[in-house]
Image (cartoon, rainbow, N blue to C red):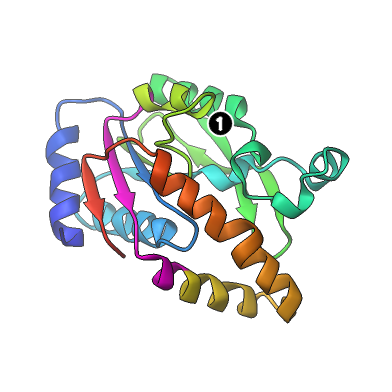
Amino acid sequence: MTLDEITSTVIDRAADKRRFIVAIAGPPGAGKSTLADALHETLLARGETAEVLPMDGFHMDNGILEARGLLRRKGAPETFDVRGFADVLRAVRQGDEEVLVPVFDRSREIAIASARPVSPETHIVLAEGNYLLIDQAPWSRLFEMFDLTIFVGPEEDVLRERLLARWIHFGLDEAAIAWKLDGNDLPNGRFIIANSRKADIRLETF
């Protein structure tokens, strides 16, 4: 599907709902945030009110991860505050007051609290993140909150190329990049592809 076709599908499906939540899921480097941002802009251009809700804002703090021996695995399923994300999704679903959501600053590797507002007037919310469609607890509790689901899943060689470019951009050395790719990101990606529920819309790449 093209971006315009996805946009039309979202608008049509959301027409009779006061609040409509789209889940955009997939492995690291798939293009989820790129799709979410592009869809957001296209929705606004077509007269909708929309906001992006990134799952990355719910990374556990580095201090907690270090104490649990998980800092090198940051980004793995067990390094997120799933309950906190579920609580925010419920508040967003209710839609009767402003909800302030956190946003992850990748350049500093920290989540910034209350960094983006979702107002009661927002019609469509684009929830974006790796594990939104995982069919295992505690992630499976999220699924009932989504009105439409999209999965972006490129081939592994495409993911590797994109992730390599990402970590070079952020200045990691060769050893750190090797660990990021084969010690964390790509294993996480394989887990996501193997354990995600079937989405309403499946894209090979974006």
Question: Label 1 is placed on what type of residue?
Answer: Phe
Q: Residues within 10 Å of mark 1 (few under 14, many from 20)?
A: many
Q: Quadrant of residue 167?
A: bottom right
Q: Give residue 127's position: percent from left, percent from top.
A: 41, 41
Task: Decide which of 169, 103 is in the foreground and name it.
Answer: 169
Quarter of the picture holding the C terminus = bottom left
- Tell me the element at label 1: helix
Q: Compared to 8, does 31 lie above or below?
A: below
Question: Relative to 87, is 49 on the left or the right?
Answer: left
Instruction: Give the residue displayed 25% in from the left and 58% down from the top.
Output: 42
Q: Compared to 139, does 54 lie above or below?
A: below
Q: Compared to 47, does 125 lie above or below?
A: above
Q: Give residue 1's position: percent from left, percent from top.
A: 15, 58
Q: Quadrant of residue 10?
A: top left
Task: Decide which of 108, 144 is in the foreground and name it.
Answer: 144
Tell me if I can see residue 95 in this picture.
Answer: no
For disc 1, the marked residue is 85
Residue 157 lies within the magenta run: yes
Instruction: Give the residue displayed 55% in from the left and 54% down from the top.
Output: 187
Residue 170 lies within the magenta run: no
Instruction: Give the residue displayed 64% in from the left and 33% down from the top.
Output: 81
Q: Give residue 191's position: percent from left, percent from top.
A: 49, 46
Q: Quadrant of residue 168?
A: bottom right
Which stretch appears magenta? Answer: 145-159
